[in-house]
Amino acid sequence: MIDWHYPRPELAQAHLAQLFDQGLSRLAFFGRRRIGKTEYLKRDLIPAAAEKGVVNTFYCSFWENKDQPHLALIRALQDALPEHQAKVKAKAGLNFGVVDFSAEVERADRPRPALPNELTLATTSFQQWVKYLDGRPGLIVLDEIQHLATSSAFATFAASLRTMLDMAPPNIAVIFTGSSLADLQRLFNDQKAPFFNFATVVDFPLLDRPFVDHLARINQMITGLEIKADLLWDLFNRSGRNAQVITGLVSQMVLRKSDDIVGTWEDIEIELTGEGGWCEKAWSDLLLSDQAVYLLLLEGQDLFSESSLALYERLGFSRGSAQQAIKRLINRSLIARNGHGRYERIVPILDEWMKLTGKTSQMLLPPPAAA
Ligand SMILES: Nc1ncnc2c1ncn2[C@@H]1O[C@H](COP(=O)(O)OP(=O)(O)OP(=O)(O)O)[C@@H](O)[C@H]1O
Ligand SMILES: [Mg+2]
């Protein structure tokens, strides 16, 4: 069967060297939604760890049980213990969910704190796992860790998880991943945070041009048609390097046995930029302050210039609210801070939609009262 997965062995080797050879035994990967974090962990990092001699890895996604993330951990630990170990290979194949920037509900419905006996069960399961390793290398992968920062109901569990991990001997490395920078910072950077100074937060590298060439090759292998990788690359960038959108596009082309990137993209784009599409929803979900900040960035303005501050004032919010707005926009993966400390927009398709619909910062102001 053709494997759609684009492997990143060098990245996995580099991370494993940091974790197991260079003594940076705890890393937290931050990267916006749908850029391939989970797929990398499951298909590249974990198998490479096994080849490097890491005896056991346990993987837990806290989104597996959003209301009771502690139960996700208990289950993952119990699955990892040898008697339960069922080796399930990650599935590879076509991706039919074409456009899904962030359809999942990110918060828990009814968050429930862990009961004391559940915390005990988590701790004893963890101790059993450590005992099973018996000094041999082990790896803990905790995906969507930021979820623990989303409700005060998870505070006790987060604190016991920290204690558990603190007890882990040096043969055990830990990787956290999160898609919300603000929530990650709440967990790792605040002085009172449960994981304060516990792991080094690093940016997760975006998939690059070779990934797109790989998808073009797959298309050719299946359909026999050569597609223009340059055009695919351009669309990948326009989607904000969203791996799901671009694999979705190529899957559609395979299904249609087509080499018509533009035509297929147009159909997909409708779901993004059409009426009631992703852009419209993403925009209407923003607060007024978020919209103002985004539009000022789009217009190339300095966010804290005199004229920008004047606009905030006329819209009825303060400089502090603008700062909060920046955080929310980062959190929603709409903007990011670049290496020079400047904020940049990262989903070009949203900008295109805004230009198409003629949005400007001045339009946010209420119309002047009639004389
Ligand atoms: N290396 C890859 N090769 C092929 N397809 C990929 C790869 N990485 C990601 N994808 C595609 O992109 C989709 C999204 O990737 P993934 O779920 O790993 O993203 P994520 O960063 O973990 O997102 P989230 O923050 O929403 O959890 C995958 O389901 C797959 O279709
Ligand atoms: Mg993921």
Image (spheres, rainbow, N blue to C red):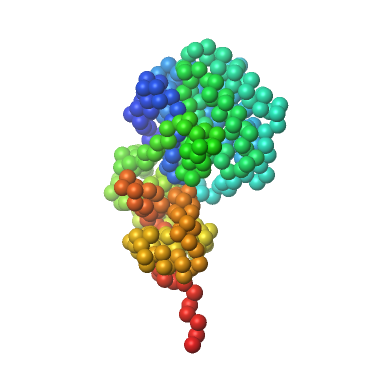
Q: Is residue 137 visible?
A: yes
Task: Name which quarter of the figure residue 266 lies in.
Answer: bottom left
Q: On the rendered structure, is 162 left or right of 241?
A: right
Tell which residue pokes out farthest to the bottom in this image: 371
Residue 261 drawn above or below residue 72: below
Query: Quarter of the image containing the N terminus?
Result: top left
The residue positioned 43% from the left and 24% from the top of the image is 25
Q: Is 58 or 122 nearer to us in this picture?
A: 122
- The spot of residue 185 in percent (x, y) is 48, 41
Residue 209 drawn above or below residue 273: above
- The spot of residue 346 in percent (x, y) is 38, 52
Residue 45 drawn above or below residue 331: above
The residue positioned 40% from the left and 36% from the top of the image is 202
The residue positioned 67% from the left and 24% from the top of the image is 120
Q: On the rendered structure, is 26 left or right of 87?
A: left
Task: Name which quarter of the figure residue 270 lies in.
Answer: bottom left
The residue positioned 39% from the left and 57% from the top of the image is 349
Q: Is 112 or 307 nearer to us in this picture?
A: 307
Task: Name which quarter of the figure residue 49 lies in.
Answer: top left
Q: On the rendered structure, is 301 left or right of 316?
A: left
- The spot of residue 286 in percent (x, y) is 51, 59
- The spot of residue 184 in percent (x, y) is 49, 40
Q: Is residue 101 visible?
A: no
